Amino acid sequence: GAVVSQHPSRVICKSGTSVKIECRSLDFQATTMFWYRQFPKKSLMLMATSNEGSKATYEQGVEKDKFLINHASLTLSTLTVTSAHPEDSSFYICSARDPTENSPLHFGNGTRLTVT
Amino acid sequence: GQNIDQPTEMTATEGAIVQINCTYQTSGFNGLFWYQQHAGEAPTFLSYNVLDGLEEKGRFSSFLSRSKGYSYLLLKELQMKDSASYLCAVLDSNYQLIWGAGTKLIIKP
């Protein structure tokens, strides 16, 4: 079945540095990918919708300049957390929609970001 | 507004059966998902219902009634490894996932 690969699974970085997270659809073309963030004891919060070849659509309250999203190809979307701070520490998850399937959303395994 | 309701926590005994309910009110409906999430890990896809009725997949079954805005996840022959959070999510008319807060399932020996 369709698989979404997310990398890295865990990353620890120092405050002020930037971190890039990759999301790849392995055997289907995803024109749309979604980026989520999970806060402790809360459900997943949609951050942005990534569209291939165009600018991402950000949810209200999400800083566009801080969370840079690039969807340069039909199989790859990246989320870059710029000038990371400890409050950015969280679990980030991407998902991609396979338009040819009856189950259109597949999730990556997530990235645990810890900013020290 | 959009709303997904599911119980916060449930407790069951190993080997038994448990049913986790989910009710929803969303702008449009393009399917309902159930995910399992162990602490510190990404959600794992369990089921997807878009038509009314019961979908069975091994020890797990999921039911949907669109007219009632209701779904349940049924887990049979519970095992200790089933201890996790179970998330109900609805795909709305814009294909955005609306998530419930999750149900923490505790399995006791």
Image (tube, coloured by chain):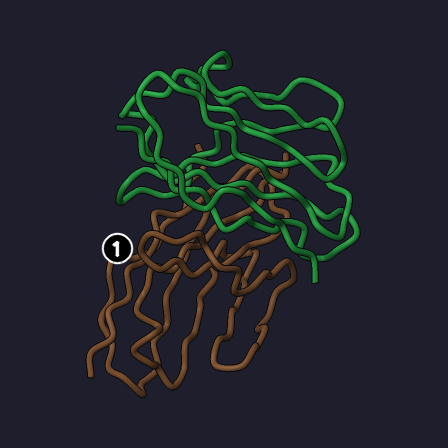
Q: What element carries label 1?
A: loop
Q: Which chain is green?
A: A
Q: Nearer the viewer, residue B14 or A69?
A: A69
Residue B47 occupies which quadrant of the picture?
A: bottom right
Image spot of residue A81 (x, y percent): 45, 23
Residue tagged 1: B8
The picture quadrant where one finds residue A62 is top left
- Residue B84 placement, left or right of B73: left
Q: In which quarter of the image is the C terminus of chain A?
A: top left
Residue A17, percent from left and from top:
39, 19
**Classed neighbour count for the residue bearing mark 1: other residues with Cα under 10 Å, few (<14), some (14–19), many (≥20):** few
Residue B17 position, x and y percent, is 35, 82
Rendered residue at 51%/69% (across/down): B62
Task: Note the chain letter of the brown one.
Answer: B
Tell me the subunit letter for badge 1: B
Q: Would you identify the image quadrant in which residue B43 lies?
A: bottom left
Please indicate whether residue B34 sits to the left or right of residue A13 in the image: right
**In which quadrant will I find the N terminus of chain A?**
bottom right
